[in-house]
Image (cartoon, rainbow, N blue to C red):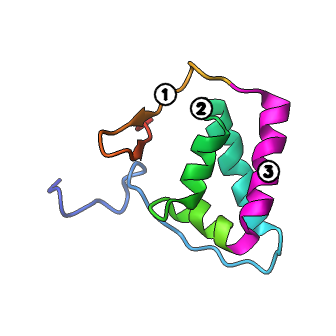
Amino acid sequence: MPYDDPDATDPMTLHGVAVETDDPDAARNMADCFIEELVRLGFDAPRIREVFLDERFAGPAMATRQLGMETVEKLIDFHLRIRGPRMGRSFVNRRADGAIELPVL
């Protein structure tokens, strides 16, 4: 299969989907999931804040714009309290330019 001609039947092809919702809690639930995953990866609070303030991470940045940083901070604190810090177990790299690089799983 040519590189620029993806097969529509290939289950490994990445597809982005926009989902519209009238649920006012949708952004909060999304932020909650992002934070939980980052805590499980070993991020501490400052690194999680960095992700939510970085416009290159579209979902977390959108959640910050919709919810405000105060709400995001409360969610970060909540997840760190219940899951605890896992420093030293992070699978995340920081590039020379300071950007965060997540692994491809």
Q: Where residue 60 sits: x, y (%)? A: 60, 60
- Looking at the image, which is closer to me, 24 or 66? 66
In primary-sequence order, the first of circles 3 and 2 is 2
Residue drawn at x 49%, y 27% as measured from the top left? 91
Magenta part of the chain: 66-85
In the displayed structure, does residue 11 sit left or right of residue 71?
Answer: left
Residue 43 part of the magenta segment: no
Discs 1, 2 touching: Cβ within 8 Å: yes
Q: Which residue is mark 2?
A: 41
In the displayed structure, does residue 90 sit left or right of residue 72?
Answer: left
On residue 91, which mark appears? 1
Q: Where residue 7 sits: x, y (%)? A: 29, 59
Q: Which residue is mark 3?
A: 75
Q: Amino acid at mark 2?
A: Leu
Location of residue 59 by image quarter? bottom right
- Looking at the image, which is closer to me, 76 or 20? 76
Location of residue 29 by image quarter? bottom right
Q: Where residue 2 sits: x, y (%)? A: 14, 56
Q: Amino acid at mark 1?
A: Phe
On residue 39, which mark appears? none
Residue drawn at x 29%, y 39% as measured from the top left? 96
Is 105 placed above or below 69 here? above
Secondary structure found at label 3: helix
Extreme residue toward the left, this view: 2
Residue drawn at x 59%, y 32% as measured from the top left? 41
For the residues labelled 1 and 2, the Cα–Cα distance comes to 6 Å
Residue 69 part of the magenta segment: yes
Q: Where residue 28 sits: x, y (%)? A: 78, 62
